[in-house]
Amino acid sequence: MSKEEVKNCWEFFDCKVKKDCPAYQTGSGKECWLLASNFCPRIRKGEHKNCGECPWYKKINADPISQSY
């Protein structure tokens, strides 16, 4: 599956910390920033300071077609 085809943040990142992720636990991988924010394992690890810096957030919010469910 290419990065363009992914449907959830954990697929985009090939995530290994799903068990610690509220987005994964609730199936909210497309809109994880609405749920996870400060609980995001990547933010907690210091990979980025907030959701606005996240490559997944930028990808989803840059494409108006992906906003339709």
Image (cartoon, rainbow, N blue to C red):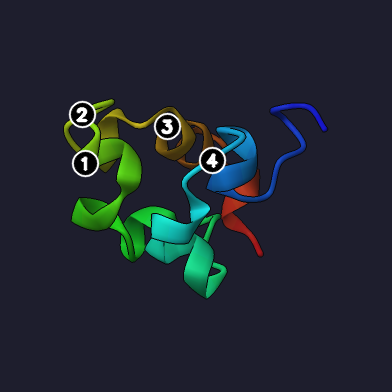
Where residue 42 sits in the image (x, y, percent)? 33, 37
Direction bottom: furthest residue = 26
Q: What mark, if any, has residue 18 been given in the picture?
A: none
Asked if residue 12 lies left or right of residue 60, the reply is right
Question: Dot 3 surroundings within 10 Å: few (below 14), some, or many (20 or more)?
Answer: few
Q: Amino acid at mark 4?
A: Lys
What residue is shown with label 4?
16
In this view, the residue in front, 5 or 64, is 5
Q: Amino acid at mark 1?
A: Arg
Where residue 16 sits in the image (x, y, percent)? 54, 40
What separation in Å lies between label 1 and label 3 (alpha carbons)? 18 Å
Asked if residue 36 lies left or right of residue 27, the reply is left
Q: Residue at x 28, y 29 (%)?
A: 53
Q: What mark, if any, has residue 58 been given in the picture?
A: 3
Where residue 67 sits in the image (x, y, percent)? 57, 54
Label 4 element class: loop
Label 3 element class: helix
Q: Quarter holding the N terminus?
A: top right
Q: Quarter holding the C terminus?
A: bottom right
What residue is shown with label 1?
44
Where residue 33 sits in the image (x, y, percent)? 34, 54
Q: Nearer the viewer, mark 4 or mark 2?
A: 4
In this view, the residue in front, 13 or 19, is 19
- Position of residue 6 relative to residue 39, above or below, is above
Compare marks 4 and 2 and give the one earlier in the sequence: 4
